[in-house]
Image (cartoon, rainbow, N blue to C red):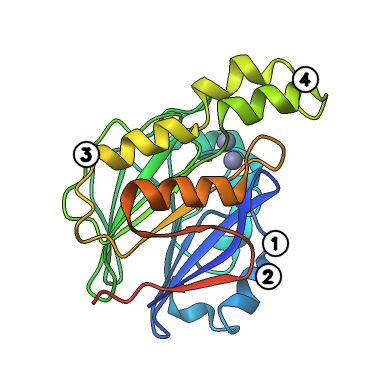
Amino acid sequence: MELKVLGSSSSGNCYILDNGNEALILEAGIRFADVKKALGYNIRKVAGCLITHRHNDHAKYIKNMMENGIHTLALPDVWTAKQLTDSRAVAIQPNKGYKLGRFKVLPFHACHDVPCVGYHIMHPDCGRVLFLTDSCDCLHLFPALNHVWIECNYSTPKLIEAVSKGYTLKRQIERLPNSHMELDTCKRVLSEHDLSHVQEIVLLHLSEQNSDREHFISTIERQTGKVVYAAHPNMTIDITKY
Ligand SMILES: [Zn+2]
Ligand SMILES: [Zn+2]
């Protein structure tokens, strides 16, 4: 099983878990033509698509998913905001389990500036995945994870520096702590989890202005002793459970 990153930032998010026969799409923030290409033009293998929240960098192309016959899971807030009704639109309830092919998914509450969920995903080929983005904290504890894909959007020193240089609007100093995950929070969330079975940590949704890719990777590597990546477009990671 592979994780393919099509986009992981405020300019568009999409990830695909794919074992060749079965695939799961996370987020619909990338043009469907690019998603199709990444699937090798085989849409029939897609078991479903999971959406975290209504912001366009995550849900802009949600309609294309359903037009292509893909069952799509999202909060009722997303369906209302996008004014979509479709037999393939599934209005999810946090903490309720869903089955998509051999994928078992559990949405749980995230902490963002609009209603948002993270997902716990299980598949026999990759084991247990934690997927959490656009969330200033993680309110749940997940045991025996095999993969952790978590937002690491900004660090406070980088944010202050970017504001002082005029790269970032001052009001982000108020907004970000309540909507996106800071490096120290990411460290704390990881320290609270048992990482002994974790194969890799993927940092998601890094801010262009308010983050430092290399520093974030080395900080998390040093703390966890795990293989750490910062997601970027066209990145592919083998996530087969060993
Ligand atoms: Zn976002
Ligand atoms: Zn968002």
Q: In this view, does 95 lie above or below 44?
A: above
Q: Name the residue under label 1.
A: 31
Quadrant holding ligand 1? top right
Residue 85 in view here: no
Amino acid at dot 3: Leu
Q: How crowded is mark 4: few (under 14 residues within 10 Å), some or many (20 or more)?
A: few
Q: How far apart are the alpha carbons under marks 3 and 2? A: 34 Å
Camera-side mark, 1 or 4: 4
Return the residue nearer the eye: 219 or 63. 219
Q: Are marks 3 and 4 in contact (CB under 8 Å)?
A: no
Q: Residues within 10 Å of mark 1 (few under 14, many from 20)?
A: some
Q: Residue drawn 62% across and 39% down?
A: 211
Which label belongs to residue 34?
A: 2
Q: Residue drawn 60% across and 49% down?
A: 213
Q: Do the residues labelled 3 and 2 touch (CB within 8 Å)?
A: no
Which quadrant of the view contains residue 99?
bottom left
Which quadrant of the view contains residue 19?
bottom left
Q: Do the residues labelled 2 and 1 touch (CB within 8 Å)?
A: yes
Q: Mark 3 points at which residue?
A: 141
Q: Mark 4 points at which residue?
A: 164
- Mark with earlier residue (3, 4): 3
Q: How far apart are the alpha carbons under marks 4 and 2? A: 37 Å
Q: Residue drawn 56% across and 46% down?
A: 215
Amino acid at dot 1: Arg
Q: What element carries label 3?
A: loop
Q: Does the residue labelled 3 lie within 8 Å of ligand 2?
A: no
- Mark with earlier residue (1, 4): 1
Image x and y of residue 69, in percent: 51, 68
Image x and y of residue 235, in percent: 57, 69
Q: How far apart are the alpha carbons under marks 3 and 1? A: 33 Å
